[in-house]
Image (cartoon, rainbow, N blue to C red):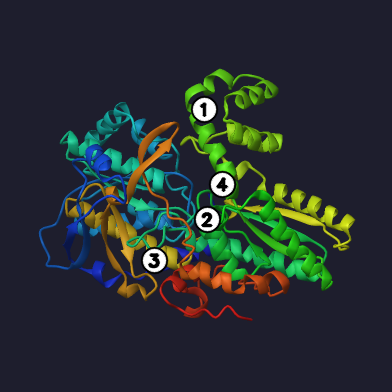
Amino acid sequence: MRRSIMQRARVNYEPVVPLALRHAVKVKEGVATNSVDDQEEIKKLFPNTYGLPIVEFVPGEEHESKRFNVGVILSGGPAPGGHNVITGIYDAIKKLHPDNKLYGFLLGPDGLVKHQYKELDQDLIDRYRNVGGFDLIGSGRTKLEQEEQFEKGLEIIRKLEINAIVIVGGDDSNTNACVLAEYYAEHHSGVQVIGCPKTIDGDLKNEYIEASFGFDTATKVYSELIGNIERDCNSARKYWHFIKLMGRSASHITLECGLKCQPNICIISEEVQEKDLTLNDIVNRIADAVVCRSQDGNNFGVVLVPEGLIEFIPAIGRLIDELNDLLAAHGSKYVNLDPEAQHDYIMAHLSKANAETFDTLPDDVAHQLSLDRDPHGNVQVSLIETERLLSKMVAANLKRREKEGTYNGKFKVMHHFFGYEGRCSAPSNYDATYCYALGMSAAQLIAHGKTGYMAVVRNTYDSPENWKAGGVPITMMMNMERRNGKMKPVIRKALVDLNGEPFKAYMEVRDQWARETLYVNPGPVQLWGPDEVCNQTTMTLALEHGVDLNLEP
């Protein structure tokens, strides 16, 4: 692929390396850990990698060079900064010993199983520094969970004399990394497995993982687009824009973009679930804002909708849970039926309450919930046009108010879905630096003999020199959840904390934003310029660590 002028200039950017990773390091171990829940079940499933201590890297003394080879896998959807994880691993292992080698397995976990790979040399690595995308080695969504897969992987690992595998991915991918680490430890294979936290959704976070990489860049990209729409909206003054944002399992992206851009309505799925709101409750809230603004002559506005909203509406959530079990147990019996017969079959096998909910859904939404699933068995909510569903219901609500004489405005709508637009952008300075440090941390975990760990970098709201690097046991983040009708160990997703400072900050101003036009256009991701322009963290991270952003107009 031909590189743009920006890409060619961007490869020369040098991420700031945290002081803890600049020279020789040693490991400082904390106390033994437990999983977030279901401790006995998780311990039984992962006896060799459970209870490990949290580790932090601190300055150490130079030792004999360490000789080892590493394989890296990019798993799941792309996220800005992935290439810098790879360059961080490469630079770190070469510094430890010049003969160390890095192999990239192609198109995700499949590359390990099918023995498709390439050695990553200096020339190739240098071309991809600070560049967006995952195209250096590609990515994929194959799950690593079968013994046959582990053994096939071991064949190529032995052939290439690989000592460790780094899996870069989200919660599902890192769960696979944990399973692989346990298998190789149980069989005394001598192969280490390290995970790395990636997902633009922002739902892979906890006390030790302040952010999953890609979230910073993606939310800046989406916010630029939202800001452009808001400026157009306030210029034309004739459309309500319904914008769906990526984030299947949590509303972190929607909240961050809302804080940045100050739209009229910003729906947070976790609040919908907590307050047991119905679809009609959500529609009424939007319609109230439309009426209120119309009274001031403003027949326009902006609504942000999280991608996973449908799953968080309690009645629909209960329906999805039962559909998951039904699909796992009897899916083969109705998957090849015609649509009408499928509908009848499902209605006949659902409980009364869930059957009533299912019967009220539009046909396309019902089909998505009942049949179309991703490789992990999840509803493909990105294919459900929630933004159109809401705008249609709001239009019907306003028609009813018009007949009642309580509304006489105009309601024209435009629809948008921002998802893929943010996944392969050139990484922000934060993500470029963060990912490079994550890669270096992964290499140090390998050098110190760790397996079943996730590389982490903390204190990232401070200047990069002061960031802290280390690793946390993946089992520490796990619990048991029902997947495809069976209880399985998975990393618990981090939802928006309704008691956290970011959401509370939004709550204080959202009624004013609904009434008034207080849009903010944050502009594009800035890669060069003053610190206050190009080196700021997300507003979410700033608020979580006590920074007063003063959202009042």
What's the mark number on residue 274? 2
Residue 203 x, y percent position in the rendering: 45, 54
Task: Count residues near mark 1 (Cα–Cα under 10 Å), then give few for <14, some for 14-19, many for 20+.
Answer: some
Q: CA distance from mark 3 to mark 1?
A: 45 Å
Closer to the chain start, of discs 4 and 2, is 2
Closer to the chain start, of discs 3 and 2, is 2
Q: CA distance from mark 1 to mark 2?
A: 26 Å
Asked if residue 439 shows in the view, the reply is: yes
Asked where in the image residue 372 lies, by quadrant, the reply is: top right
Q: Which residue is mark 1?
A: 326
Instruction: Name the element at disc 1.
Output: helix
Q: Is residue 387 left or right of residue 177?
A: right
Residue 89 x, y percent position in the rendering: 30, 55
Residue located at (55% from left, 63% from top) = 255
Task: Count residues near mark 2 (Cα–Cα under 10 Å), then give few for <14, some for 14-19, many for 20+.
Answer: few
Q: CA distance from mark 3 to mark 2?
A: 36 Å
Q: Which residue is mark 4?
A: 314
Residue located at (45% from left, 39% from top) = 140
Is mark 3 in CB contact (under 8 Å) with mark 2? no
Closer to the chain start, of discs 1 and 2, is 2
When the figure is inspected, residue 432 is found, relative to residue 493, above or below; the finding is below
